[in-house]
Image: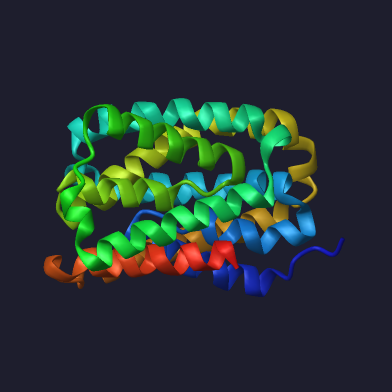
Amino acid sequence: MAEPALVPFALLSFVAGSVAAVSGFGIGSLMTPFLAPALGMRLAVSAVSLPHLLATALRCWTMRAHVDRRVLLEFGLASGAGGLAGALLQGRLADPFLTRLLGALLVLAGAFGLTGLNARLRVSGAPGVALGVLSGFFGGLVGNQGGIRSAALLGAAVPKDALVATATAVALIVDGCRMPFYLWSDGARLAAHAPLVAVGCAGALAGTLAGKRLLSGIPERLYTRVLSLLLLALGLHLVR
């Protein structure tokens, strides 16, 4: 298979980093499908994991003061466990059907946000733990965890900065759990695609810095609708 073109991938990585800075998701969701036709789903997930980790760490550092520690402990630890399970099962269960299932869940979450039904759902206790495990599991398995995570945090009744910051901190936990398995299983093959991974890292980091400015310009009252539209768009993209 031909190596993906670097310039389009650089542009996509920039857009993905910008979207993630606004919504708390987007890097794995956009970059993984781009690479999968050329690299295969398993190697694509592994290749995107390093840009995801670096951009997430940068975003987490710049927004660390806004992290909701209660939500992080409850939701984040469950996501870490789910990410570990998904990474372990990646070679056995990763399947286009799972990606489409994730897309359908995101379409539903986006519709809930646009109609206001999400205000009736409060994510805490057992439902919060279950959604944390689910989002982490998809992250470890097919590289798409952020949409479910941000959708769940819409029900946590936190401001936009706290939502993005907490979602980012959770993503960092998941990355820390899954990365060792990717490096152990695919490290040698990833070395052959080092320029591609480097371009993805640079684009995602630059996009993260640009997206942070976009987030500050979105009024709090409109943020739920913006995030819901992004969830709906991502869901439709994944189920197509």
Q: Quadrant of residue 214?
A: bottom left
Q: Is residue 34 left or right of residue 145?
A: right
Q: Is residue 210 visible?
A: no
Q: Position of residue 150 (x, y in %)?
A: 33, 51
State the scheme by which the image is colored.
rainbow
Q: How many discs mark residues in the rendered view?
A: 0
Q: Residue drawn 69% across and 59% down?
A: 35
Q: Residue 62, can we see it?
A: yes
Q: Residue shown at 37%/46% (left/top)? A: 149
The residue lying at 38 percent from left, 67 percent from top is 230
Residue 169 placement (x, y as % from top left): 33, 40
> Where, quadrant-wise, is the C terminus in this rendering?
bottom right
Which percent across, then down, holds residue 160? 19, 57
Q: Residue at the spot x=33%, y=64% of the render?
A: 111
Judge whether 240 appears above or below 103 on screen: below
* The one of 16 and 229 positioned closer to us in this rendering: 229
| Residue closer to the observer: 95 or 38 | 95
Quarter of the image for residue 142 reads: top right
**Quadrant in the picture for the N terminus:** bottom right
Q: Is residue 107 left or right of residue 41?
A: left
120 relative to 100 in the view: left or right = left
Whether 137 is drawn above or below 62: the answer is: above
Q: Position of residue 81 (x, y in %)?
A: 46, 25
The answer to whether 13 is drawn above or below residue 67 in the figure is below
